[in-house]
Amino acid sequence: MTLRILHTADNHIGLSFNQYPEAARERLVDERFASLERMVATANNRKAHFIVVAGDLFDKTTITKAQIERVVRILREFEGEAVLVLAGNHDFCEGPDSKIWKQFRTAADGGCVLALTEPDTKAFDSDDFKVRFYACPCPSKHGKEHTIGWVADEEKQTDMLHIGIAHGNVEGLGLDADQRYFNMADSDFRNAGLHTWLLGHIHVPAPAPGTTGKPLYFMPGIHTPDSVRCSHPGHAWWIELDADGTCRHEQLTTGAIRFVRMTLALHHANDISTLRAKCESLDPPNTILDLQLTGRLREEEVAELNAMLGDLSPRFLDFSRDQDIAPVLDAAAISKRFPEGTLPGTLLHALLEDESHPADANLALDIIESLQKS
Amino acid sequence: MKLLSIRLHPFGGTANRTCTLQDGINVLEGPNEFGKSTLSNALWHALFTPTNLPPKTLLKTIGRWYPKPGGDHARVRLEFEANGHKWILKKTWGAGALASLQADGAAGIADPSKVQELLCTQLRRNEATWRQVLFTSQAQLARTIDELKSKSGEIDEVQTLLAGAAAIPGDIPANKLISAMEDDISAHFGQWDQNTDGPKDGRGIDREWKQKVGPQLQAYYAMEKVRRDLKKVWDYENELDGINSKIKNLSEQMDDDEEFVVKGSGLRHGLTRRASLEQIGGGLPVELDLLMNVLTEWPGTPKAIQEKESEVTKIGEYLESLGKELVHAQKRAQAEQLRQGYVRLTKAKEEWNTAAQNLSKSKSLETGLLSELKELEPGIENLRIELEARTLTAKLESGASLSVRIQRGVEEAETLAISPSAAWEGQADGRFYLELEDLKLSVESGDGDMSDLFANLESARKRHTEILRIVNHDSLAAAEHAQKRHKDCILEESKKQDRYKDALQERTEEQWEADMAELAALPETRSVVVLEAERLKLIGERVKVEHEIGQLKDKVALWTKDHTDTNTLTKKILEKTAELEEVEKDLADLPTLPEGFSSIADYLCQLDRRVEARAEIGKDLNQLKIDHAQLTVAAPEFTAEELRADLEIKQREFERQQATGQSLLRIQSKLQAVIADRGINDPMQGLAAAVSSHFNKLTAGRYQEVTLDGSTPVSVSGSLSLGTSLLSQGTLGSLALATRLALSELYLKDMNGFFLLDDPFTDMDTTRRAAAVQAIGDFSKNHQVLFFTCHPDHAGELEELPGASNLLMTE
């Protein structure tokens, strides 16, 4: 017998993306549903027994009912045993009266989608597998202590698989300096005595690609990127567990949109060409591109850069740039503009000597040019 | 810029001519219409008129220089040196318009605008400066003062040039740049306090500045607003967490209590009934025990009373015999005291007898003898002293050995052995007697009657010896000691006698003897103390037993009263036993007290408390849920994660603005340092001095000083001080030339350039002209001069100057 699980987390359905123009915003909002649909389709194609959502399916507890229902509709398309949805710290469950989870249960009533909102176990027994899940949901957005301690005290039958589902920071994997996010350590997982843990919270996947054996835990990372801080395309884990706990896993790519922040220092025409090549290597209609450009270019190069970016920007889903490009200003350029003996020339030469503040000369040039124009 | 050659082909009436120019003065002399103005204009347009002017402007500007009739273009080729390079400038205006500029045969530029831009750089002075100062026509020289006044704003600023910055195209006066920097800094730091590095007057986002807010403060406000929003979101999330945590805790508490309360509700009735039965039935076993005890005890009690009464009787008898023994014991105790008194009496009597014996052994001295003896001893001593005062000294010497008998004073006679080698010498008190064989020598002191003295002494001594013999003592001291001892014996005997009398205690010795005999006849007993202790103990025992008897009698009385008799009592016990069995049967069917509680009352009390507490928790929980709902409705638009990302952007922007602000301050500081290095103090002094120097030479020392307003002369002073409007035309021309020379020196300082003069001497007399020629000659030592004139004598005067050359125009 082999148990097949598609493990996802941190889907953050309901992120508003208000900082983006309308077209991009709509696409980004929709992408979070779309990638969920793709995951369900993948799970069905691969005949998964379970889809496990290890917290933060929703971005906030104030998510609209319509969005909840849309998510549930998508998840109900799953043809396997069950979709297990754990309450994470963004969509925490404070108690039986939790509005979001009441609405979720109402929407999911009678289907295969199950909300895991209380610390409890869920056992499934079929011809193919025998498994017991240990749900450790978040009761609040922040928590100084993790919620998995009780699992160690549970009696475990030896003839079934035991899998934990939890949400929170993992020491050594994510940063939680203030211990605010249900911080868990490897020792906590080991003490629990389970075959493995399916986790959520950290947006970067773990274990690292190429890892074999029996991982202590899986962290899928966000299923589709939500900002430039996400450097991967969005992932989920495909996990197969034999009855003896032997584990095989595969990282699935689930996102269709990329956020790319390109930070480049431009000093030559070649750099502009490199920038163009890098931009063109992306998938513009599905890319939110944020350029952070610095450097010094000749005037004609600046014009070339602007023309190039002007040509590229409409092709991207969204395009923004933070540009700190100043014209090349060296002694020769200053002498060319301001013959020896002029006050601007003397000043600019003097400023150029201050190598620790190379931008000063450019700023001074701007002021001088502005004065000349006036 | 130094001119090398200029070719006009065509330009105006000149179809094709080339003019080669030299260093120093280049003199072009010819009559009017010779082409001097054409050459001057060709040079001007080559330098300053772009070839790409709009057609109308072009025609208006350069059209007059198209060849007539029918010419449609003008063309000039100019060669010059600048910045160490040789340049070729080609310009064609009109048909076939062209502009090119190349250096040292390299590929040149052909863009008309760029050509013009580059030319401006090479010319280093703006167009107005060249026109008003360095290109000087006859008419312009005359109008110099007026032109300088009216065009002062167009030409490169003199003050800046004097401060060190030459009037170079693109240059900016220091005051303008300083002012611009101050404006930029002021704008950038608008309402920002650089000292506190925060908003001016501490006005943060709660009291924002609205006017004149600089970009740094704008960025700061934007950042702080996001930070405030983020804090609000954090506070919101923490508050929500807090409420959720409370709801969770209370819910758990409710769940715990629910189990207890539900169970307790079911138990309440049964436990209440149990409590009641236990209260009723709880006394029955005790009551039964009591009745059983009575039943057991009652039959034996009369006998016990009897035994105890017998015991009391025995104790009474024993106490009686003990009383008798005690009487004897008390008597014996009293006899002991008597015996001790008797012992003391016996001892006192013995001591008295001893003292009496001692007294009888002691003898009393006759008082008269002792007194006489006391008087004799000092008398004898006085007589002896009197004899010692009459001491005689004798010396006996003899030629032969012999024996003599001597007596000194009252001493015993003595025999002396005298020889020739052993004389004798000695002293004698009052009298010395010597007897040698038959010789008897008696010597007495001659002072007084020695015989009486010796007699008195002898007599006293005899009486002294006699008395001692009578009292049987050796000395007066021994006699006195014996007398004292006698007196002591008398006192001792008296004292012992008194003690004896005291010991008798006013009784007789016979009475004592009789009592002692009676005492010897008393029987032996235990001590009074022991007997008294035993008596008290027996009395206590008798009281106790009597009390017990009373108690037993009371019990019997009570039992009789309560139960009449033992039969009745037996019946009662049977009834109570049946009643107890009934209660125990009922209790077996009722619920028992849950563990952990000391009593049913304790459990029910706890149950009531929890029911009440649960109601209170329910109220709190409802309130928390209301708070939670209200908080959820007021959820912030953005999440903390979104705001944190936004804050990063705003922080970056603020840091950028801070960096810009610091850049501006550094630039301002550097600008001030640069200007300070260039020395801008009183720059106009240099120009005034230069103009004065030239004018002094041109007027042959008639005027020494020229006063300027900006760069325009306003008055001159020498022997007289005159405003320029009062000067003669000739003097005014000299002043104009002096001013132009001074300005030209200034503008051409540290650079190549040329100075063009078109017939400047027309209004000067010979003297002034000679001075002017000399001044121009001096000027040409440093700068190229183009001098056009239609006056051969003027040309001739200049051509005589060293380095002057005649300008030739070749086909």
Image (cartoon, rainbow, N blue to C red):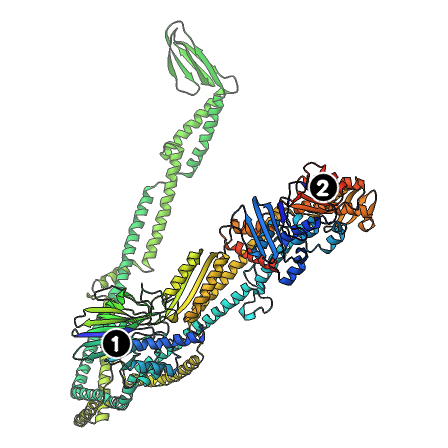
Residue B25, position as x, y percentages in the image: 68, 41
The single residue placed furthest to the top in the displayed view is B399
Q: What chain letter is assigned to the residue under label 2?
A: B
The crowding category of the residue bearing disc 1, from other C-alpha atoms within 10 Å (few below 14, some 14 to 19, many at least 20), is many
Closer to us: B155 or A149: B155
The single residue placed furthest to the front in the displayed view is B69
The crowding category of the residue bearing disc 2, from other C-alpha atoms within 10 Å (few below 14, some 14 to 19, many at least 20), is many
Q: What chain letter is assigned to the residue under label 1?
A: A
In the rendered image, which residue does mark 2 sit on?
Answer: B776
- Note whether residue B50 is visible: no
- Label number found at residue B219: none
Residue B214, position as x, y percentages in the image: 57, 64
Q: Quadrant of residue B478?
A: top left
Left or right: B655 with respect to A8? right
Left or right: A251 with respect to B1? left
Q: CA distance from mark 1 to mark 2?
A: 100 Å
Q: Is residue B634 above or below residue B366?
A: below
Q: Quadrant of residue A193?
A: bottom left
In the rendered image, which residue does mark 1 sit on?
Answer: A43
Q: Say yes or no: labels 1 and 2 on the same chain.
A: no
Residue type, mark 2 in image: Ile
- Note whether residue B425 is visible: yes
Residue type, mark 1 in image: Ala
For numbered disc 2, what is the local secondary structure?
helix
Left or right: B766 with respect to B109? right
What residue do we see at 35% from left, 80% from top? B250
Residue A242, position as x, y percentages in the image: 18, 72
For numbered disc 1, what is the local secondary structure?
helix
Closer to us: B659 or B610: B659
